[in-house]
Image: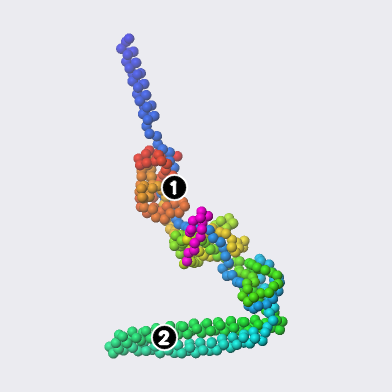
Amino acid sequence: MSFVNVQRKTIVWAGGGIALLVILALALWPRAVKVETATVVRGPMSATVQDRGQTRVVDRYVISSPIAGNLERIPFQAGDVVKAGQVVVRITPASLTPVANQQARAAVAQAEAAVTQAEANVGRAEAQEQLASKEYRRVSALHAQGIASQSDVDSARASDQTAVRDAQAARAAAAQANANLASARAVLLALHPGAAGIVELRAPVDSRIFTIPERSGRAVAPGEAIMTLGNPHEIEAVIDLLSQDAVKTAVGDRAFLIDWGGDHPLPGSVKNVEASAFTKISALGIEEQRVHVIVTIPDPPPTLGDGYRVQGRIVVWSSPAVLQIPIGALTRFGARWGTFVVENGRARARQLEIGHRNDEAAEVLSGLREDEPVIVHPSDEIADGVRVSKQ
């Protein structure tokens, strides 16, 4: 065998060995994990709370009988539209007795006397209020000159405040006396409806009839509800929020009604957050403390009625420019939030300080810069330093 042939075989074997080593290295070299990435962006963001509720008419009017009598059959049905001042109910009073008539007149006279006495008390209290105010100013001036003591000033101030409260109480008593007089006169008028002997109840505003418990003619008692009216164009929504969500809301917050049956959300705003919570049992049998949050709907569609089921979404926070990442990019590093950032083809763990969150994104307070790529929905293969490649 010549030297040339030996050399050739050596080169062939060496080349084969090198090729084999390269193949083994490639086979054993860790492959990059395919990942889905997103970019850290700065833009508008909002946080919301959401729950179910139902609509209700803002102003609801209950037509009830002012007297005992016989109700004529009601010619309307639920859903009918009535005009302000239109007669909706007619009642024939029960037979009157001299005793009932005399009692009604005596009640009016008694109420008139109470009004006279209350107005006199108002005059006396207001005069005392003016006198106490003058005395307080006089003593204060003397104190400024070093003539009156501080205790004299304190006594005059207390007398002035007491006189103010007494005048307020007298005016409130006068208002109550006038209300009692109006009630007594209304009863007397109901007992004497006129020559025809019929009491006619009229619609207070342009409205629609919501409920009529019974249309048939029958005997009615004083205060018995006959029908319910309301303006269907003035509707609000009552959203039952969990108490921990209700504390985040405030009057004036933007709100939207969704899942109400239309193809677009209805805008509104929070009108009131009730101060008292109530207990409600969830579908899973868990006791929940919930709060009624009232949302006004400025332009309700004509198809949305009273008592309709809706879903309320309330914006509790918003900002026009927030550094944020997709919610799926968040992961837990012990007790802190974090994410995986792609740097030079490798995943790098980064701890974050997170602010507000919603269903789609999280506000980043610190730990990231704008335009950095982060891994979304990292698998168990992802760890600090792992080679990754974009899908």
Q: Quick check: 279 above or below 141?
A: above
Is 197 displayed left or right of 300 in the figure? right
The residue under the point 46% across, 61% down is 243
Q: Which quarter shows the C terminus?
A: top left
Q: Which quarter shows the N terminus?
A: top left
Residue 361 visible in this rendered orientation of the protein: yes
Q: CA distance from mark 2 to mark 1?
A: 66 Å
Type of the residue with mark 2: Ala
Q: Count how many numbered circles sit on residues in the image.
A: 2
Q: Nearer the viewer, mark 2 or mark 1?
A: 2
Per the image, label 1 sits on a secondary structure element best described as helix
State yes or no: residue 281 in magenta: yes
Per the image, label 2 sits on a secondary structure element best described as helix
Type of the residue with mark 1: Gly
The spot of residue 58 in percent (x, y) is 56, 68
The residue under the point 32% across, 87% down is 152
83 or 177: nearer the viewer: 177
Is 369 displayed left or right of 272 in the figure? left
In the image, which disc is placed on residue 328?
Answer: 1
186 or 150: nearer the viewer: 186
The residue under the point 45% across, 85% down is 167
Please state the extent of the stretch shown in magenta in the rendering. Answer: 276-288
The spot of residue 315 in percent (x, y) is 47, 59
93 or 252: nearer the viewer: 93
Q: What is the quadrant of residue 317 in the picture?
A: bottom left
The spot of residue 302 in percent (x, y) is 61, 63
What residue is pinned by disc 2?
Answer: 163
Residue 255 visible in this rendered orientation of the protein: no
Q: Earlier in the sequence, mark 2 or mark 1?
A: 2
